[in-house]
Amino acid sequence: MRRAGGRGPEELRAVSITPGYLDYAEGSALVNWGRTLVLCAASVLEQVPPFREYSGSGWVTGEYSMLPRSTHTRKAREGQGGKVSGRTYEIQRLIGRSLRAVVDLQSLGPRTVVLDCDVLQADGGTRTAAITGALVALALALENLRRQGIIEIMPLKEQVVAVSLGLVAGRLLLDLDYEEDSKAAVDANFVATAKGDLIEVQATGEGGPFPAALMSEMLALAQKGFAQIARIQEEALASWLPLPW
């Protein structure tokens, strides 16, 4: 199987991150990942959810949306019927869990950072692009708080990186685009720190069960993607703040 653009099985699509893309958000980033475009914005709220009250610590959460013309045909704007789809809710929770894993919530104090991830154009890997960009937006927002003296230390402990991969036509491929994803017998998303410590793994046998031994092969391939994505994040942030990790 020949991949679009002549990519090898272990190659990412072209990935770039533009930090500070929005004027009004405390932190923001536009992620170009192949033909997938995701805009991430971090907003700081001086409040916490009810279950965090009186704890003295903060919260990080995510919201995710695919815009109506992010796909080949117009999709209805989510939320107009009063609820979001199960897929959207699952991705929102994934974004929140992934970023909370690397934030010292006690150092953040009694405030919430909301990470809004809006898919402008979708060609596969939207959740991994969202997590990747959300990390950059979060770092900028937290650095803004530190520079204002609102918090004493940067609460961000490590990077979060995420990548998709799958088994397509009998071959493991890193970073699936939509065409590859639609044909995948096994579809997986890996979220980890830049050091390679896993935060979350999602793997599905689309065509039925798959051998357990395949998991180790998928992890090895994902690790190669982690290193590339971490470098891209660092390059995006280097001129904006002292890297805290």
Image: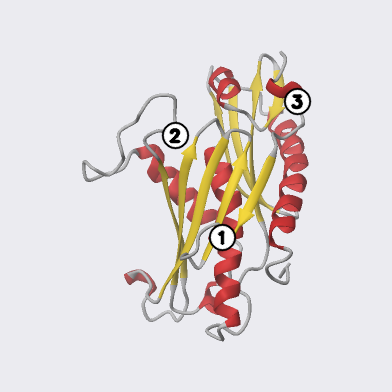
Nearer the observer, disc 2 or disc 1?
Answer: 2
Task: Left or right? Give the position of 56 relative to 155.
Answer: left
Q: Quadrant of the N terminus?
A: top right
Residue 196: tell me if it is visible. no
Q: Which residue is mark 1?
A: 137
For marks 2 and 1, the one nearer the N-term is 2
Q: Which residue is mark 2?
A: 70
Q: Which residue is mark 3?
A: 7
The structure residue drawn at horizontal position 60% and vertical position 57%, both measured from the top left corner, is 135
- Mark 3 in CB contact with mark 2 (< 8 angstroms): no
Q: Between 121 and 157, which is closer to the camera in this rendering?
A: 121
Amino acid type assigned to the residue bearing label 1 in the image = Ala
Percent x, y for residue 158?
Answer: 68, 63
Tell me how far mark 1 sits from mark 3, CA to CA. Answer: 29 Å
Percent x, y for residue 122?
Answer: 50, 33
The structure residue drawn at horizontal position 36% and vertical position 35%, both measured from the top left corner, is 68
